[in-house]
Image (cartoon, rainbow, N blue to C red):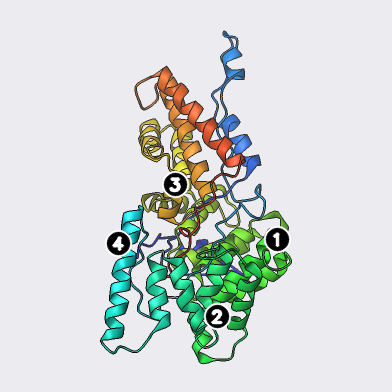
């Protein structure tokens, strides 16, 4: 697994300095409107005395996208999706998603044939494994039927039913019922439920944070996520560790040192969203002493791994430091794909921050094209990318980047 090497003296966890021999990896983004608003002024060249500045007054401003989360409501600021079944509970087939109706029908027929063959061969019934095969192929109604056969005796089936009722997979959404399933797992003394507890705690924290199925409580969400994160244990919920990093960046519980600690833990355990978050925290000295070298290391590795928000911040950094060719080249690559949901799913990053990364890159590419910096001057292309910036930011404001149902859950593997 890739690691983002960070100076040992940089790590500040709870209670004092943390010296780490390993590197870091992981990634996400955030937003600090005050810093972003100041950024364009800080890097402007002095006005010429012999020329009136009307063009400067109309000059487009870069998108407000830098820093850590703080300007979104609780349903938007991070990717709150159900934790999937932990990988150590059974041998699971590789996940697949049916495409058109013909592929779906072919998959369903193949599964029916396989299960019929197993029954005729005298293989004992295995509702959970059969249900899991249906689930991994996106055949949720069939999976639900299999899991319900054993919901009172199989904790793994109970867990999957909780996820399906919460996310509305194969059934109508029923968050209250989902919460019941997760509570049964978390409160069980059975050894068979032990490996499911951290994932159940994460999902319950999600329910309390969203106020879905239970009364909203940030404090209870925090408590449950701390259980799920298990002090940074790599075998615990890495999603909970990254989520805590985001939570402690929010105004309601703002503690940037705690945010840095949890992003560091998630980053060490391979989380891409937290890798970008660490880069941003180092770059602007948020929760940690400013360290440009460590910031660029994290941001570049996160960008290479597909973190679009990290790419947007790198474009901004290159442009403001006058590395115009680098800025233009990276911005072109960042803005090639307009499918925000696909990019978010591929990187397992929040669509809002993917969109903001694209908007940042589009803005600075437009500036490069307008002024001929690092790329051939092209006013028409510049207008196109300015327009794209505004279009993407409008979509962000309208909250249109929610991932499609059934595509957003973490696969539980590293």
Question: Would residue 256 appear left or right of 410 to someone viewing this image?
Answer: right
- For label 4, the SS is helix
Task: Report, in whole angstroms, how far the alpha carbon at label 4 lies from the one at label 3.
Answer: 35 Å
- For label 1, the SS is helix
Question: Would residue 20 appear left or right of 95 to someone viewing this image?
Answer: right
Which residue sits at x=54%, y=50%?
Answer: 402
Q: Which residue is mark 1?
A: 253
Task: Please name whichever residue, 328 or 353, is drawn nearer the observer in this view of the structure.
Answer: 353
Vertical position of residue 186 compared to residue 164: above or below: below
Q: Which residue is mark 4?
A: 106
Q: Which mark is residue 309?
A: none
Q: Residues within 10 Å of mark 4 (few under 14, many from 20)?
A: few
Closer mark to the observer between disc 2 and disc 4: 4
Which residue sits at x=47%, y=41%?
Answer: 312
Q: Is residue 316 visible?
A: no
Task: Report, in whole angstroms, how far the alpha carbon at label 2 lies from the one at label 4.
Answer: 36 Å
Q: Which residue is mark 2?
A: 197
Image quadrant where one finds the C terminus: bottom left
Question: Would residue 50 appear left or right of 140 to someone viewing this image?
Answer: right
């Amino acid at each position: 697994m890739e690691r983002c090497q960070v100076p040992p003296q940089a790590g500040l966890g709870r209670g004092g300095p943390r010296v780490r021999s390993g590197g870091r990896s992981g990634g996400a983004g955030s937003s600090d409107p005050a810093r972003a608003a100041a950024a364009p002024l800080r890097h402007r060249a002095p006005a010429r005395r012999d020329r009136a500045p009307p063009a400067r007054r109309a000059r487009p401003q870069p998108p407000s996208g830098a820093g850590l989360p703080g300007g979104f409501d609780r349903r938007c600021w991070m990717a709150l999706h159900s934790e999937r079944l932990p990988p150590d509970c059974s041998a699971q087939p590789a996940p697949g998603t049916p495409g058109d109706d013909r592929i779906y029908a072919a998959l369903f027929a193949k599964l029916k044939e396989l299960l019929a063959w197993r029954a005729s061969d005298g293989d004992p019934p295995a509702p959970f494994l059969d249900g899991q095969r249906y689930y991994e192929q996106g055949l949720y109604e069939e999976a639900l039927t299999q899991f319900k056969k054993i919901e009172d005796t199989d904790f793994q089936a109970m867990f999957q039913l909780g996820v399906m009722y919460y996310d509305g997979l194969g059934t109508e959404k029923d968050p209250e019922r989902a919460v019941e399933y997760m509570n049964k797992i978390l409160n069980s003394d059975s050894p068979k439920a032990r490996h499911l507890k951290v994932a159940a705690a994460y999902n319950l924290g999600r329910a309390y944070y969203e106020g879905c199925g239970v009364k909203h409580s940030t404090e209870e969400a925090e408590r449950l996520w701390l259980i799920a994160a298990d002090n940074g244990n790599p075998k615990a919920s890495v999603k909970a560790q990254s989520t805590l990093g985001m939570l402690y960046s929010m105004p309601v519980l703002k503690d940037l040192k705690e945010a840095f600690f949890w992003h560091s833990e998630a980053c060490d355990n391979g989380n891409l969203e937290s890798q970008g978050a660490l880069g941003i925290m180092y770059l602007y000295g948020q929760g940690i002493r400013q360290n440009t070298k460590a910031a660029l290391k994290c941001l570049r590795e996160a960008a290479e791994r597909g973190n679009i928000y990290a790419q947007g911040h790198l474009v901004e950094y290159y442009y403001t430091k006058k590395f115009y060719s680098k800025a233009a080249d990276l911005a072109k690559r960042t803005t090639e794909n307009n499918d925000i949901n696909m990019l978010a799913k591929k990187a397992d990053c929040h669509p809002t921050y993917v969109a903001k990364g694209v908007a940042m890159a589009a803005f600075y590419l437009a500036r490069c094209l307008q002024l001929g910096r690092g790329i051939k001057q092209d006013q028409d292309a510049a207008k196109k990318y300015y327009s794209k910036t505004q279009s993407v930011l409008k979509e962000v404001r309208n909250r249109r980047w929610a991932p499609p149902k059934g595509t957003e859950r973490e696969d539980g593997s590293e």
